[in-house]
Image (cartoon, rainbow, N blue to C red):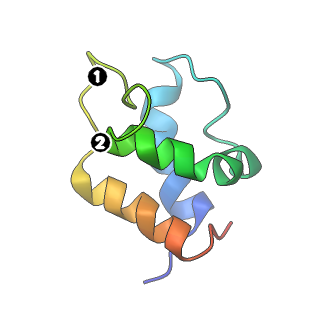
């Protein structure tokens, strides 16, 4: 199944927009595409501060896998 930013990725981050301060707009396709590797590292906890930050719970592993799939597919809009 193909992924897209509009139907899969933006909705994944929508619940966190109001509660957290991000360095960039996670609802903006170009911004997320440009920063996808850094975002993925933070989602997996392998680089930088975790995303979302505590006390918020981490994303479900299936959502992290979906983000990785989106990157693998070339970050389609």
State how many labels appear: 2
The percent coordinates of residue 38 (x first, y second) are 54, 43
Q: Quadrant of residue 67?
A: bottom left
The percent coordinates of residue 37 (x first, y second) are 55, 51
Under circle 1, the secondary element is loop
Please indicate whether residue 39 sits to the left or right of residue 5 in the image.
left
Please indicate whether residue 56 sits to the left or right of residue 33 in the image.
left
Under circle 2, the secondary element is loop
Graded by Cα atoms within 10 Å as few (under 14), some (14 to 19) or many (20 or more), the crowding at tag 2 reads some
Q: In the current view of this chain or complex, which residue is farthest to the front?
A: 47
The percent coordinates of residue 17 (x first, y second) are 53, 27
Q: Quadrant of residue 4?
A: bottom right
Graded by Cα atoms within 10 Å as few (under 14), some (14 to 19) or many (20 or more), the crowding at tag 1 reads few
* Residue 73 sits above or below residue 19 on the image: below
Report the residue at 24% width, 48% height from top: 60
* Residue 68 sits above or below residue 18 on the image: below
Report the residue at 36% width, 22% height from top: 53
Q: Which mark is residue 47?
A: none
Q: Quadrant of the N terminus?
A: bottom left
The residue that mark 2 highlights is 59
The residue that mark 1 highlights is 56
The percent coordinates of residue 28 (x first, y second) are 71, 44
Q: In the current view of this chain or complex, which residue is farthest to the right?
A: 30
Report the residue at 64% width, 47% height from top: 32
Report the residue at 68% width, 66% height from top: 77
Please indicate whether residue 76 sits to the left or right of residue 63 in the image.
right
Q: CA distance from mark 2 to mark 1?
A: 9 Å
* Residue 39 sits above or below residue 29 on the image: above
Residues marked 2 and 1 touching at CB (< 8 Å): no
């Amino acid at each position: 199944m193909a992924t897209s930013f509009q139907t899969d990725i933006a909705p994944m981050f929508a619940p966190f927009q109001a509660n957290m301060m991000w360095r960039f707009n996670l609802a903006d396709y170009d911004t997320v595409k440009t920063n996808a590797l850094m975002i993925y590292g933070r989602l997996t906890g392998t680089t930088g501060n975790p995303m979302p930050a505590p006390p918020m719970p981490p994303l479900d592993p299936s959502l992290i896998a979906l983000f990785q799939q989106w990157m693998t597919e070339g970050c389609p809009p």
